[in-house]
Amino acid sequence: MVFFDNVALGPSPELGFATASLERDAWRRDDQDWLKQAIGSHEARFIAICKDTPVLGFAGGVLQPVFTLGAAKDLGSLGEPLFLGLENARPLFAVDVAAGHFDELKLRDDLKLIDMRSMAMQGLFTPGLLNAIGTAKAMLTWHARHGFCSNCGTASVVASAGWKRRCEACKSEHFPRTDPVVIMLAIRGDECLMGRAPQFPEGRYSCLAGFMEPGETIEDAVRREILEETGVRTGRVRYLEAQPWPFPGSLMIGCLAEALSTEITIDANELADARWFTREEVRQVLQGQHPKDITAPPRMAIANHIMQVFVDRAG
Amino acid sequence: MVFFDNVALGPSPELGFATASLERDAWRRDDQDWLKQAIGSHEARFIAICKDTPVLGFAGGVLQPVFTLGAAKDLGSLGEPLFLGLENARPLFAVDVAAGHFDELKLRDDLKLIDMRSMAMQGLFTPGLLNAIGTAKAMLTWHARHGFCSNCGTASVVASAGWKRRCEACKSEHFPRTDPVVIMLAIRGDECLMGRAPQFPEGRYSCLAGFMEPGETIEDAVRREILEETGVRTGRVRYLEAQPWPFPGSLMIGCLAEALSTEITIDANELADARWFTREEVRQVLQGQHPKDITAPPRMAIANHIMQVFVDRAG
């Protein structure tokens, strides 16, 4: 069917957090009886996160990303379990471990605390488990920053197994937030535009990116961000693929944009530098062979995949 | 360039709220001196919204979507002006008129209060002005529901000319929220899957749609929503175009999905019905000529455009 020619079924398994194996089974979120039974069953597994950092079991040199209920309770004081879905037919939950336990957990021989980016970079778990851990992190961070009703200021409560918060005072319902972000290369013939943010490692260049704003299409947001950050005007925009990015809860929307101008005026608040790279240079950057040691973001980041599309699919 | 073949430069002007003419000039949002001067200048214009409804000037049979500062103050008690950008080189702001004025404004001969959907349906203003009014509505509704810090419950204050709220107590910053929503047709050869929600007008069928969740790609959200609502499994997903949708603040992401199964089991909480339509039937629906009087959503809605793509670009 012509609609789906050249459309991939799913993202590359290397794209961090993007390949799901979880069955979310949303209809179970309000089934209190089923949830109670599931949490207490010996099949249930728990992703535990403390101060935004996944807590992993460690035994016989093997990392274990999930806990039984008993082992999770042994970590310390837990928040309310959030139901993520079924993973391999087992109910999978996310729990927050109270921040006060962080230092004692770090000292335990049977645990490792590994930050999410390192976990994704190192490919420690299957893509599906990494997606579930990222989902757990995004959900728990949202709950941690949304304990109060934004409408009236009253403390709100968890509802629908974590997929809502409800304010008993003003009856508002609040849902986990996902912030769309555009991330893109502007392309002009055989060259593309990349920038470096002040906080990047030395030599690192990447795609431009920025949060979408109310009232924008994806394509308008792409054009605005490129214009704001570099002064380059762009026209047509092509969507490539998307990546959930749990830092803290973004949806990265990967695109290419057709450059209509070439002169660069950087926004010094956003970028330390921006410049045009030839396709051959980008190839060298991706292969770690650039003569000036310019490096790319890691394979787990969508920026790397957008650069690869530019290199592979010559225009 | 092959990357941009078959990519449109912008959406159809009929697609409501999607065609921007506003220059957002984000760098002015923190320039207090410029903002103060701009608000007071005779060039400044104000979009006024009361109880989620745009207030329009009405004189000599002509509707006027913006007010001068003096005319805006004459509407009643105003919230802090939010800077939208430059429209035709003039600074454009959004202001909330206190809800208590609603009934008196409705009685005034020199005003009309017209709800946003009607405004978009009737094409009362240029696409660019409609986009600015939609942006104003999305921003003002967000502020109205976010007067308190979700992190600590303290009343927060407007910052950056409306593009942030800041909590002076816990120092959190909060940004206007945009909720990504997937909206799509599942396609199987010459047929597509449409549904009707219980609240639809009689005879109306449309694309399926639903909010994206943390941890999802666009493509996964498309597949999950179709599966949840109809039981139909889908494979490859193709992005078409997007629409900002200020009810209250969504980004509609329009897609087609390749159906892998045909049997329908509707989720009765979401849908009153769902069924397969042939391409010829969809053409009749769009033309208002379906023998059973089945109707499509209006041209201002992205669902109509997705249906049109299915009809026009035979697979």
Image (tube, coloured by chain):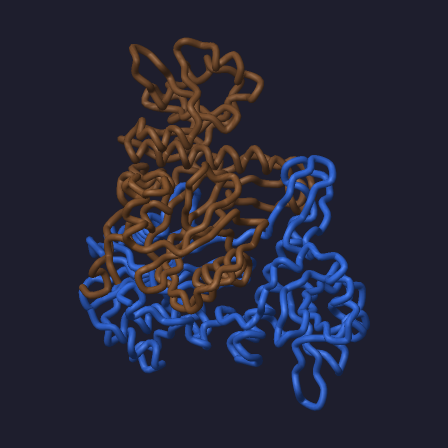
Chain colours: A blue, B brown
Residue at position x 71%, y 64% in the image: A95
The image shows residue A262 at horizontal and vertical percentages of 21, 56
Residue A124, relative to residue B299: is it above or below?
below
Residue B270, relative to residue B29: is it above or below?
below
User: Is A35 in front, or is A202?
Assistant: A35
Residue at position x 71%, y 79% in the image: A57
Marks counted in the figure total 0
Residue A57 located left or right of residue A247: right
Residue at position x 58%, y 74% in the image: A129
User: Is B148 in front, or is B202?
Assistant: B202
Quadrant of the image for the N terminus of chain B? bottom left
Residue A276 located left or right of residue B30: left
The image shows residue B283 at horizontal and vertical percentages of 28, 48
Query: Is residue A274 in view from this perspective?
Result: no
**Rendering quarter of residue B136:** top left
The image shows residue A297 at horizontal and vertical percentages of 42, 71
The image shows residue B146 at horizontal and vertical percentages of 59, 38
